[in-house]
Image (cartoon, rainbow, N blue to C red):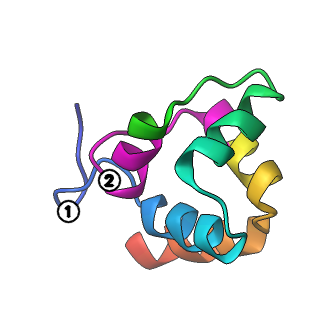
Amino acid sequence: MKKFNDCRNVIGNTIKKYRELRNLTKTELSHKLELLGIELDRFELYKIETAKTSVKDFELIGLCIVLDIDFEELKKIVENYG
């Protein structure tokens, strides 16, 4: 799997920050994602938050919807790694 600066994703910290701001456990977030047809269990969410795995585009979209993450914030994160 490809890495950038020894990370497999650059969004993990943001996912964790917003999950905690919304007072959601990984299990609760997983259940909300299931309602959108996205299957990520709490261990997979852990791997995303710790940048141990990559995030598929549809998973990222679902995470942004459930956690109410603004596209402009994602853009800033990507620009900081560019």
Dot 1 falls on a residue whose secondary structure is: loop
Residue contact between numbered discs 1 and 2, judged by CB atoms under 8 Å: no
Circle 1: residue type: Asn
The picture places residue 13, in percent across and down from the top left corner, at 44, 68
Q: Callout 1 environment at 10 Å: few (<14), some (14 to 19), or many (20+)? A: few
Rendered-image quadrant of the N terminus? top left
The front one of 24 and 76 is 24
Circle 1 is placed at which residue position?
5
Circle 2 is placed at which residue position?
51
From which residue to which does the magenta span run? Answer: 45-60
Residue visible at 77% across and 21% down in the picture: 37
Is 49 included in the stretch rendered in magenta?
yes
- Which is nearer the N-term, disc 1 or disc 2? 1
The picture places residue 60, in percent across and down from the top left corner, at 63, 44
In the figure, 69 relative to 51: above or below? below
Residue visible at 68% across and 31% down in the picture: 58
